[in-house]
Amino acid sequence: MAYSGELAAAHAYNGHWKSVHREPDRSRIREIEAEELHHRRLVGEMLESLRVRVSRMRELRAAVIGRVLGCLCHVTGVLLPVYGAGKLESRNVREYEAAARHARDCGRHEWIECLLTMAEVEWEHEAYFRAGVEAHWLGRRLALWPKPPPKEHIRATFEHAARIPAAARQRTSA
C-alpha cells in the first residue's frame, strides 16, 4: 500500500505545486513530490527483494486518486489541499515507524535505517503542511490532526523498543 500511496501523493503534489503562486511554496512542494517518488523507489526495491508483486488495480486507483486530487488543487483554494496533505503525512510517519519495527522483528535489519529516515522525511512534510494550515486565516479555526512528537522521538522510541526483549514487548502490547 505504501508503494501505491507514494504514487498517489506524488501525483497530488504535482498538481498542488502547479496551483500555488508563491515561489517558496512551489519549490518546497516540488521537493516533497520528488521525495515521495524517492520513497516509492525505495519501497519498490524492498518489495522486489521480497519478490512481492504490486497490485495493478491498486496502482491504477492510486494514479487516478492522485491525479484527481492534483486537479482539485486548482479549484479548491490552498487550505483544503494543505490540510489533507498534512493529515496524510502524519499517518505516513507512523506507518514508516511501524515498518521499521516489522523489519527489525523479521530480521531485515538492512531496511531499518532507510525506513526510519523515510519516517523523518514524512515528519518534515507534516510539519510543513501543518504550518501552512496554521498560517491560513480559516485554518487557525480548524481542529487539526494530533501533532506528532518531536522528530527526534522517531529514533528514540525505536531504540528504546529495541532494548526491550521481544517477549516483554508482546506482553505490553496485548
Image (cartoon, grey):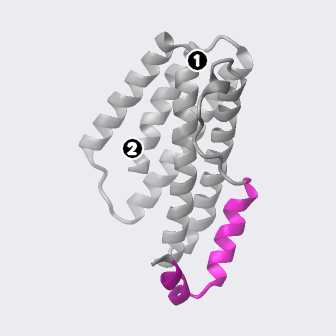
Q: Which mark is residue 4?
A: 2
Q: Amino acid at mark 2?
A: Ser
* Residue located at (32% from left, 40% from top): 59
Closest to the observer, 155 or 170: 170
> Relative to 13, does residue 91 appear above or below in the rendering?
below
Up-down relation of residue 135 to residue 148 (above or below): above
Rendered location of residue 169, percent (x, y): 54, 82
**Helix, strand or loop status at disc 1:** loop
Q: What distance separates the C-alpha of mark 2 from that of mark 1?
A: 25 Å
> How far across and down, in percent of the image, does residue 152 sit?
75, 58
Task: Give residue 164's quadrant in the image.
Answer: bottom right
* Residue positioned 60% across, 37% down in the render: 144
Residue toward you, 75 or 145: 145
Residue 42 lies in the magenta stretch: no
Q: Residues within 10 Å of mark 2 (few under 14, many from 20)?
A: many
Q: Main secondary structure of the magenta part?
A: helix
Q: State left or right for residue 131 relative to residue 84.
A: right
Residue in front for this viewpoint, 120 or 76 = 76
Q: Amino acid at mark 1?
A: Val
Res 87 label: none
Taking the spot 50% from the left edge, 56% from the top edge, the residue there is 95
Residue underneath mark 1: 78
Mark 1 nearby-residue class (10 Å; few <14, some 14–19, many ≥20):
some
Examine the structure image and report whether residue 156 is included in the region drawn in magenta.
yes
* Circle 2/circle 1 CB separation < 8 Å: no
Instruction: Tell me where the magenta segment starts and ends, as one range.
Output: 150-172
Query: Where's residue 145, x and y in %?
Result: 57, 41
Residue at horizontal 43%, vertical 52%?
Answer: 44
62 with respect to 102 (left or right): left
Give residue 159's quadrant in the image: bottom right
